[in-house]
Each structure stands twice: as structure tokens, then as C-alpha cells.
Amino acid sequence: MPAVSTLARPQLDALLRGSGLYLRTGPFTTCIKSTIPHIIDGIARMYAAHRFEPQADYADFYVTLSASAGWRRWFRRQVNFHFDGDHPFLPLPLDQAFPMLEWVLNWCITGRAHSYLILHAAVVEKHGRAVIMPAPPGSGKSTLCAALVNSGWRLLSDELTLVGLDDGLLTPVPRPISLKNASIGVIRAFVADAVMSRAVAGTVKGTIAHLLPPAASIARAGERALPGWVIFPRYQAGSALVMAPLPKARAFMQVAENSFNYSVVGAAGFAALGGLIERSDCYQFTYSSLAEAIERFDALARGAP
């Protein structure tokens, strides 16, 4: 499959405005249609290394994002999401079109990909073993994930950990990393050559920008990973670095609370989560320095206690 970067801008425009761009992200193909410049610009910039299917006749998800019609074309313009003829989301300001696309892609996976146990967690890999990082908003999860994948770790996802129900392996879905508010400046300073989407203010999550995922991670999107660690990160300004062991029973309950579909997949999800916790060393992790955090994660990957 060719990369999106092989499309000249008029070709990308024509696909998105016409039959759709059949974009491949991990195991999923999404047919995306839109005439909105923010969407077209965002895909051209943030999905350049991703593959697309030029002659596809099937997609896992079909999504359309369009600008509002009628008087909304002229006053406080909005973007609408269409899915199978329905409108699952309320319209958002047109300026938020690309963040909306990212939320839509997450929504499609979490609501329909029930061949996996889906966790709300970042996941990165090094030397064949993955770190799963479940955490609530504001914990520094995505900031730490962005720093790690720009320091030698492979990105599987900054938002969605897909656990195989049959074998417990982790399936990558490498996409742009969502950064919010102060994290945007932190990563701009930490990653000298960071490529980001334009920052969009005023969303329900504050100001959002997306960081380009490493091309090497996208190229390895077909390579699943073994779980090695479950780490609950928390950024705390001025704190010392603390990596504290977490009892597996407690880790199980906390990860279950961070699952999108644990109750949907039933006994298979219980078994998959149990296997994940059994395979993994579990920790609470507090940090204030990204450099120190990366050094500690690298030590884990080398086998240091």
C-alpha cells in the first residue's frame, strides 16, 4: 500500500472530497470523507507516513466530517460528524475539525473493535516488551509517551491499548499523539525537531495539538508486542522519581476501571486482563523530570530491577 505522502495535494483533496481516503491505522481501515481544509491539512501533515488503500471496496469504519449548511456557513461555522447516516456527536466549532477527527477515530475503535480488550492507556515498546500506562487526564501520560517514543521507544498508541482476547498480545495503532495545554510547550522544548499540528484552543480539553508519530513506529504497525509492565504514571512538579511496586490485585482493578469494553467482552476480557497482569510487573510511578523518567524506563527495558 502506498503512503499518504505519495499523494499530491490535489489528489488527496479529490479522494477526501469524493470516494474517500481509505486510511490504514494499525489493523483498521477507515474511509474518511471531508471537504474541510483543516481536515485535509491535518491528514496531509499528521498521516503522511501512514498507508492508504487506493482501490479499496471495504472499510471497518466510514466517517464523514462536513461543515454545517444553512446560516451556519456564515456565522460561527461548525463541523458535523456523520456515521452510517447518523450524527453521534454534537457539532463543534469548525476550528476544531482535526481534533474532532481524532476523537471520532478513537470512538469508532472503542465502540466497535470488540475482538480486543480495549484499555484507555498509552503503550510503548522496547526490546520486545511493552509498557502499558493507564492514567486519568492530567497525569502526564501522553507527555511521557511522547518523550519516550522520541527517545528510542516504539509507539503502539498514546490512547488505546488493544489486548488480544485469544493470546494477550498487544496490537499497535500508532497515530498522532494528543497533547494538551502545558504539555504542548513541554514537548516542543524536549523534542528539538517535533512536528505538530496547529494548536487549537477552546476545546472541551483545553488547547490541543497533535505530535507526528515516528515513521519507524508506523512502519512496524503490523508487529504486535508482549506486555512487560503496567505502570500508572503521575507527573508531580518538583517531586523525586518514585517507582513503587503495585500489588497485582490492585493493578487488575485499576486497569479494569480504565477499560472501554471490559464489561462488553465478558469472560474473555476477564481472562485477557488476568493474563496481562500476570505477565506484567506493576508499578506506581511519580516523576517531575522527563529525562529521569526515560532513564528509569530504559533501565527497565535493559532488565534492571
Image (tube, rainbow, N blue to C red):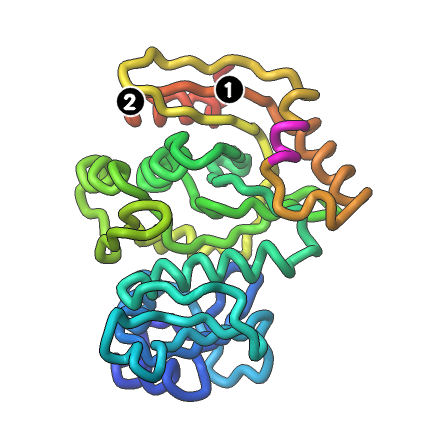
What residue is rendered at 75% in x and 49% in y?
265
Q: Residues within 10 Å of mark 2 (few under 14, many from 20)?
A: some
Q: Quadrant of residue 278?
A: top right
Q: CA distance from mark 1 to mark 2?
A: 16 Å
What residue is rendered at 58% in x and 22% in y?
282
Compared with 288, 185 (above or below) is: below
* Residue under numbered circle 1: 284
Q: Which residues are magenta?
A: 253-257
Compared with 220, 249 (above or below) is: above
What residue is rendered at 53% in x and 36% in y?
130
Residue 68 percent coordinates (x, y): 36, 77
Q: Which mark is residue 32?
A: none
Report the amino acid beneath label 1: Gln
* Residue under numbered circle 2: 289
Q: Is residue 118 left or right of residue 63?
A: right
Describe the element under mark 1 as helix, strand or loop: strand
Q: Is residue 8 left or right of residue 172?
A: left
Residue 65 percent coordinates (x, y): 41, 74
Counting residues from the start of the chain, the first of labels 1 and 2 encountered is: 1
Specify the principal SS of the magenta part. helix
Q: Is residue 256 magenta?
A: yes
Residue 1 visible? The answer is: no
Task: Spot the residue most to the right.
Answer: 267
Q: Is residue 290 magenta?
A: no
Of residues 250 and 242, the one nearer the viewer is 250
Residue 57 percent coordinates (x, y): 58, 84
